[in-house]
Image (tube, rainbow, N blue to C red):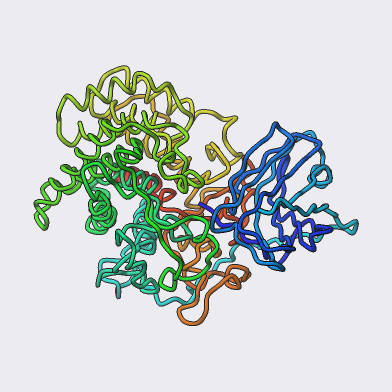
Amino acid sequence: MFVVVSWLLFGIAASRLEDCSGRFEVIDNWEGGCNVEMDIVIKKGTTAWILGLISREPLTLANFWAGEVGWKGTKEITVRSYDWAGKQSPGSVFSTGFVLNYNPAIKSYKDAIKKITLTLKYTDRTSQKCRIVLDDKPSPKPTPKPDPKPNPTPIPTDEPEPGPNPTEEPTVKPNSPCDKYKRALELSLLFYEAQRSGKLPPNQRVKWRKDSALNDEIVGGYYDAGDYVKFGFPMAAATTMVAWGAMDFKSSYQRAGQWDNVKAMIKWATDYFIEAHTSKYELVGQIGAGGPDHAYWGRAEDMTMNRPSYKISASRPGSDLAAETAAALAAASIVFKGDQANPEYSAKCLRHAKELYEFAEKYKGKYSDSIPDAAKFYKSWSGYQDEMAWGAAWLHRATGENSYRTKAMEITSILGSAGEISWDNKVEAVKILLAITTERQEYRDAARGFCQRILNCDTCKTNDGLVFIQPWGSLRHASNVAFACLAADAAGVTSIPYASAKHQINYILGENTRKFSYVVGLGSRYPTQPHHASSSCPIVGPCNWDNYRSTKPNPQVLRGALVGGPKSRDDNDYVDVRSDYVTNEVTTDYNAGFQSALAALLSTCK
């Protein structure tokens, strides 16, 4: 998830929109692309608008937060306003931002921009054209934010260090690598507490968070990222991944003194999923609309915008969402099985998992077709078949019923292969899970092949050895692969590149040439400006876009959060700046595979 706003303190290409009295500013650029922020002064009132971009060269446009992007060929783009952004009064300033991609053969983003004409059309069919005028004077450079200096004195916060008792000192002070795994595991669970929505429990350890979103149709669950939408699909995927690590490496959580905390983390999600399963063939898949939510920067506790809920049903199916939620609940049922404190909870999770899988089977369709708002942020690109196999595989593991194993194997046989494991794509993850649960050679070979293909690909790595899969959340992708392959190795799948998998996590913890930890609050040099609204706010006083623009560290230390990481195969292609939502955003799914990989590594410590 991301947030794009229009006012920044600096730009690398100061320019203006002639005839629109506006601003067109490139705030970041790379070979073949740039981040743009734009203001247009609206000349007349309108209830909707269409922005047209025409170029003399092929281009693409992405992440336009106020409208839906469409193409007419390769040189003409139209953006139709979302309902919430369409209404504009005369003289108002329409502000937005987007990513512009163009032919890398064009030497400069300035040359690409000069080829573009903008036209803003109104509902009365009138329009205003905007000509982009780049200043001839040298472009002001962004002031690079230096890496955080060693800081032995913690940044002031009312949050206690994590531990069994919120008033105690940290249970782990890292000295050895194994101690660092324990500490990072402890902190990651604290991050999930910072993401809680709803009525917080008495033992809440993140004290700068309070009750929030109590009027949601379904109260509870986790906020997705630095914003406050509750997206059910990635929330379920993160829960499944954490539960997998918890069941396979329970001893690691017990060793770190975090078993009760990981169960609480999983249950915060599964309680929400159970409540969201409002009838046999109905599931709330999202609460909060992306656009209005991203237009707000402040505390979760201070939100006043409307927070609609979106459901899948028999008439609006979402097999991927239903099957992934079934997977999360089935995996959780294994974690909670035999729990003396709540002996009936495991069966409750499993009952809902079975019903949701039946829903996914009976009414086929992609959830992002049924919940269009989710498609703008978490579109189901891989379709629903991988989740159908994934859900069946987890139900087989939870129940031992061969019918689920048969379904998982039949669907997996038509899935092909993938180059990632993510909230969207479980193709390779389900093969690894089947390798563990069935021990069939075909799945063991597939698991080995995937791990070797990704982890042994030297041309796919940074100089420091990070597996680079894609720019957005690069560390999340490396962590997911690392965990799945470590789980396969622990289950006896031979010839897994264990050292490379381990290095992905060590890289994140600071084993890189920058000696920089990408986990907030871990070590002496770590991100101080994660793209996260709540932690950017002071304990008391106003919090708004001024806090977003602040160049100071976030007042609240978002301990345990894993940031996105480098956005290219250059290890230095990372800046600790709040506005960089590609490299410095945090999300619940970023931490999931990372946390489970920590548990896997801790299990090998003496």
Say which of 247 and 65 sits in front. Answer: 65
Q: Position of residue 488 (x, y in %)?
A: 33, 31
The answer to which image quadrant residue 193 occupies is bottom left
Q: Nearer the viewer, residue 100 or 123?
A: 123
- Residue found 29% across the figure and 72% down from its top: 166
What percent of the width, then of the height, locates residue 175?
40, 58
Q: Residue furthest front?
A: 124
Query: Seen from this angle, which residue lies furthest right?
Result: 136
Whether residue 257 is visible to the viewer of this picture, yes or no, is: no
Name the image quarter holding residue 304: bottom left
Name above or below for residue 42 compared with residue 440: below
> Residue 598, image x and y in percent?
36, 47
Which of the pair 191/381 is nearer the observer? Answer: 381
Residue lying at the far bottom in this picture: please name it: 541
In this orientation, does residue 418 appear? yes
| Residue 224, image x, y percentages | 42, 55
Q: How many marks?
A: 0
Identify the residue at horizontal 19%, vertical 44% (top origin).
352
Q: Is residue 409 left or right of residue 45?
A: left
Q: Is residue 184 left or right of residue 121?
A: left
